[in-house]
Image: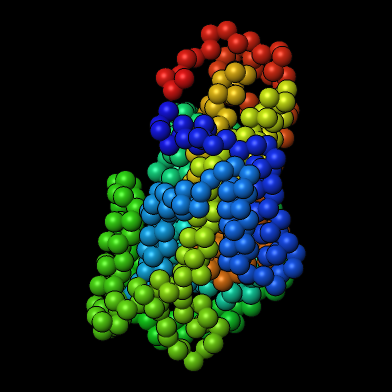
Amino acid sequence: MSNTANEVLNPVKRPSMAASILAFMSVVVTLSVGGLILGTISVHACLIISTVIVCLIAKYMVGYKFDELMGFMAKSLAKATFGLWFFVAIGGLIGAWMVSGTVPAVIYYGLGIIKPEFFVPAGLILCSVMALCTGTSWGTIGTVGVALIGIGESIGMPLPVTAAMILSGASFGDKMSPVSDIPNLASLGAGADLYKSIKAMFITMAPAYVISLILFTLVGFHYGAGVADMSSAMETRQVLAENFNLNPIVLTPIVLMLVLNFKKFPALPAMAIVIVYALIIAIAFQGVRPDLALEVINSGFSVDTGTPFVDEILNRGGFQSMLWTFSIGFLSLSLGGMLERIGFLTVMIEKVAAKAKTVGQMALLVVCSSTACAAAFGDTYMPVVLNGAVYKHEFDKTGLDRSMLARLTSEGVLMPAPLMIWNAFGSFAATAMGIAPSEYIQFAFLNILSPVVSVVMAFLGIGVVWNNKKNKGVRKFKDVDLSDEPVFEDD
């Protein structure tokens, strides 16, 4: 086990159970009451208040000094440098794909072939494949997702439905892709094999995805057949054709991104290459001045077509548009760094895990604590790794395979995260799609169903992954055969 993991699981100054519960509840109550119930306090203010409260608890109930707490925040931000730079890259990518005509071309050609009643299920599958191939839900939402928002608005599809469809497809691909961060980190935290973990994830994801696809199809047929306004779609196509060179070559930035991801090129450098290529396309095909093309990376794309609803679709992107999200990520990671390093989560889990007597109870515990961490930490990376590190020895004691642990932590963290506006994933999705999670949560079928289906299957003894195949069908730990259990190197 790494030094960092040891520090998390065995902090120098161990907090009491009372301090741990108080710290977590202060974060949950502040965010839920201030941001969700009252609705008058910004997420940023709630995060700052939560950070101050946790600092006071850590100082007066655990014994940490202020400098130590600031050090925890700094280390958390240092580890998240990649994630913070991702905000910059996504903002630049959206702007570059707008000015190059890539997104406008996707909207133009998409409106020409997609029938309104099939838009939602087709969009779900498209986002799923895109995220599966690229390994990034954020990149999918910020590129193909933005184009689908434009198509949806043009045919009269309610924005909450379109946003939830994009989010569900992007989350699926992110969770199931071997080139994605989440399954790799989930496997790393649990100490499990990556491909074995993905196989375990598929067991519960498959039924959840099928159910979600059916629900999205029904919703799509309801709205697509009832209120689709094809006159707006035709007007949108006309406006795009008048303002952009829609030569198929402007679609090649998408091809380049897919090729780089298939080659397993590092994400940030790959995005930088695609941005530069898209800007070259903008200069060569859209006639944009080089200096204006470069400025799009920072300020975003802006155009006045004379048609307000089309301008609303196109005018987006740039790093400046991501500052609201970037600041939430900064505050959330600072708070999460303290909660992680002080060991509040470890103390609570150790007390509760021993009381789990059945597979279903253990699955429910892992999913709930993973979701609580995603809410409290405001991040997806650390909760996945930390919950895996905390629970893996409990899974060894009960005979459950660690690949199942990787499945549960990813379901508990990744799937609910975009439904929380204060989580980095949720705030990014809200910024990129122009809609708050509270507005699309009722249609986010896959994000809600995935953890629910997984826990229900565990209680029923279906899809449970054991180290010993003799335990197939066993639900209570007292009936488990613990012979021939594997010995893990990190023990």
Q: Is residue 199 above or below residue 230?
A: above
Q: Is residue 349 above or below residue 240?
A: above
Question: Front-most of 292 and 379?
Answer: 379
* Numbered disc total: 0
Residue at 58% across / 48% down in the picture?
Answer: 59
Give coordinates of residue 375: x percent, y percent. Answer: 62, 51
Q: Residue furthest top?
A: 483
Drawn side of residue 27 relative to residue 336, left or right: right
**Coloured how?**
rainbow
Residue at 54% across / 87% down in the picture?
Answer: 308
Q: Is residue 267 above or below residue 226?
A: above
Give the image quarter of residue 246: bottom left
Drawn side of residue 18 relative to residue 167, left or right: right
* Camera sees residue 156: yes
Q: Is residue 368 above or below residue 240?
A: above
Residue at 53% across / 8% down in the picture?
Answer: 484
Question: Front-most of 50 and 161?
Answer: 50
Of the 4 image quadrants, the one containing the N terminus is top left
Give coordinates of residue 123: x percent, y percent. Answer: 55, 59
Drawn side of residue 427 relative to residue 359, left or right: left
Give coordinates of residue 346: x percent, y percent. Answer: 59, 35
Residue at 58% across / 53% down in the picture?
Answer: 55
Drawn side of residue 476 relative to residue 446, left or right: right
Question: Front-most of 17 and 241?
Answer: 17
Give the image quarter of residue 476: top right
* Camera sees residue 108: no
Give coordinates of residue 473: x percent, y percent. Answer: 69, 19
